[in-house]
Amino acid sequence: MASTLPTKDHSILIVGAGVFGLSTALHVAQDGYTNITVLDREPVPSPYSAGNDINKIVRAEYEDPFYTALALDAIKEWETPFWSNFYRPTGYLLTTSLNAPQKARDTIKKSFSSIGDHPSFPSGSFSAVDNANDIKRYLPMLEGQMDGWSGYLNRYAGYARAAKALEYAAKRCLELGVRFVTGDDGYAVEILFESADKGKKVCVGVKTANGDIHKAAHTILALGAHIGTLLPEISQQVTAKSWAVAHLQLSPEEAAVMKGCPVVNCRDLGFFFEPDEDTGLIKLSANGAGYTNNITTSEAQASLPTASNDGIPTEDEDLIKRLIQQAMPQFSGKELVKKFICWCADTPGSDYIIDHVPGTMGLLVVAGDSGHGFKMLPVAGKWVKKALEDDEQIIERWRWKDKKSGSDNISWRVGKVKDIKEVEFSGLKSRI
Ligand SMILES: Cc1cc2nc3c(=O)[nH]c(=O)nc-3n(C[C@H](O)[C@H](O)[C@H](O)COP(=O)(O)OP(=O)(O)OC[C@H]3O[C@@H](n4cnc5c(N)ncnc54)[C@H](O)[C@@H]3O)c2cc1C
């Protein structure tokens, strides 16, 4: 059944309808593939997708020009009529605060010096901000003192209305004839192989929680942070890590004042967005190195997402409150609502993994989003399609790695990774 080189009528099974899975389905369907099925344990947008959120940052300045180019490509797509309903080009303020570690300051300086006069950004995109007065000149809605805040404003950036963009991608896929199977019927529990061909196991599809068998010539796994549950051998290069998300409910009058605020990202505290236009919710997230959930299974030692994502660590709640106090103290008296942790799939060097699983035929994986995958929703699928059609990954950094390689010291993250079982949760004793 499995064949290495796909033809347009071959059956393609995409497991996981999150950011990478939907983008892949869209790109292969748009290219004329006619037999595509997408499985997910929940309807789109799944509560298990890291992309199921009111908004996600879209920005292109990376320290690494490789991802800068890809993100610029993605922004161009966000600006097209196909995606633009879900893109808000508010701009992006990136700063550190008074007590930021030197590492955070250095990273911002480095990224500012590498992109300040980058020819692919529209001229005038960037302005340095050296203090609170500079910031308030561009962001007058921020009433806080922002002591010691400095960094830069990037006007060629903004955010995506994330969950809505996922729903839209799924709708467009349906229109193109993609089949969706969700719930227990779409919850993959086992990858199915047939006898070896040329020394390789031949993947013929997956089995789902209701016992159904979904057969396909090409199976693509796009399970985000959950990839290690179905493909344990990837856990040596992918670590599930989580971060805290919380919200402030604004009144319509308060939301009107904050409308148009660029995304504010203070590296040593956290980040927030303008109020959501439907609900008036401001989404905030704490910055940090992330929380693992290390467990030992019969097959591997791995960090895998927890069963429930409710609540956030107390230390992150404190960070978010400090962020509010420093930037928008007018909302300090408000309770934080809709608090949860959100899981992504981290790799040591923050590179994605888009490759055929070694020792197999007909099985491709797209994983390792490393917390910077959402902005790529309009373009990621074309990279997956290319790897599928080439029958190999020609981009070395996206290849499967047999052992952990690269450093865990990710330059744009502050602090130390902790295990989620060891931190106190606000409102809960601990998270088990
Ligand atoms: C706190 C946080 C903030 C972030 N902010 C940003 C940002 O501002 N900008 C940005 O670009 N990126 C951001 N990201 C990263 C972005 O959300 C991810 O890169 C992206 O969601 C990864 O896409 P994915 O398809 O790999 O996984 P996901 O989007 O998580 O999708 C995985 C899918 O697999 C499904 N699934 C899981 N297990 C199974 C199974 N066994 N069977 C069937 N289906 C299954 C899930 O239901 C889900 O739909 C953030 C991530 C986090 C954690």
Image: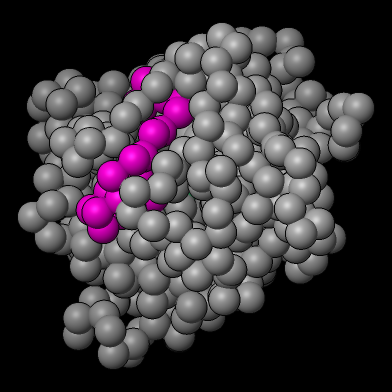
Nearest the eye: 403 or 220 = 220
Which of the 4 image quarters holds residue 278? top left
- Magenta segment: does it hold 30? yes
Nearest the eye: 173 or 136 = 173
- Magenta segment: does it hold 368? no
Image point 8% across, 55% down: which residue?
81
Nearest the eye: 417 or 169 = 169
- Placement of 338 over or under 96, stated as above or below: above
Quadrant where the C terminus is found in the figure: top right
- Placement of 244 over or under 383, stated as above or below: above
Query: Is residue 320 at least partly visible in the picture?
Result: no
Image point 21% across, 57% down: which residue?
78
Q: Position of residue 392 (x, y in %)?
A: 58, 68
Which of the 4 image quarters holds residue 152? bottom left
| Count of labels in the image | 0
18 sits left or right of 169 in the view: right
Nearest the eye: 212 or 296 = 212
Q: Position of residue 264 (x, y in %)?
A: 36, 52
292 sits left or right of 390 in the view: right
Q: Position of residue 279 (x, y in %)?
A: 20, 23
141 sits left or right of 247 in the view: left
344 sits left or right of 118 in the view: right
- Placement of 132 over or under 16, stated as above or below: below
Query: Is residue 178 at least partly visible in the picture?
Result: yes
Q: Position of residue 131 (x, y in %)?
A: 38, 67
Q: Specify the segment rendered in magenta.
A: 24-46
Image point 50% across, 38% down: which residue?
216
